[in-house]
Amino acid sequence: MSKRNIVHVEIPAANVGEAGSFYQQLFGWKLQHVPAMNYTMWEDGAGGGGGFTEVNAGNPVGQVLVYIASDDIEADLKRVVELGGTVLQPKMEIPDTGWFGVFKDPTGNVLAVYTDLNPS
């Protein structure tokens, strides 16, 4: 079983490039922009990382999305429902990267579970 570590954090941004620049200057994060997705990946230099996503109706300002390691996304999402949460995004592939699912806990917080294509 995975250690259930936080493996990725997505921060909504009105302007993905400007947000990346802000955090790079503030924290020294290494950035990699993915133009096809209008997505900027960030790494903190200590093994943590995430991305900047464009703000939209499903990804509002203030809803930072935390991804937690999962060995079985489908089982985790089933358990979410059993415990009173709601599945917002069933298991979905990120090409050449892995899989994820998004859920809302009973309080209304939105989180995600993630499985890497090549776990190390």
Image (cartoon, helix red, strand yellow):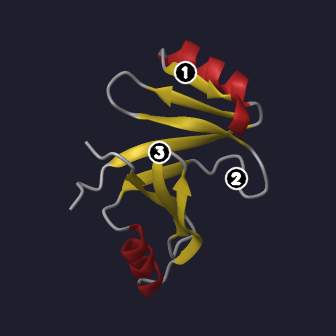
10 Å neighbourhood of mark 3: few (<14), some, or many (≥20)? few
Give the amino acid at mark 2.
Asn
Judging by the rendered image, the residue that carries numbered circle 1 is 31
Instruction: Choose top left, top right, bottom left or bottom right for residue 18.
Output: top right
Residue beneath the point at 39% across and 80% down: 79
Left or right: residue 37 compared with residue 44: right
Q: Residue furthest bottom?
A: 82
- Residue 108 percent location from the top left of the image: 57, 69
Q: Residue furthest front?
A: 96
**Amino acid type at image mark 1:** Leu
Q: Which residue is mark 3?
A: 97
- In this picture, is 55 found above or below 1? above
Tag 2 secondary structure? loop
Callout in the foreground (1, 2) = 1
Mark 2 highlights which residue?
59
Q: Nearer the viewer, residue 106 or 14?
A: 14
**Quadrant of the image occupied by residue 58:** bottom right
Q: Position of residue 104 (x, y in %)?
A: 55, 69
Vertical comparison of 46 with 85: above or below: above
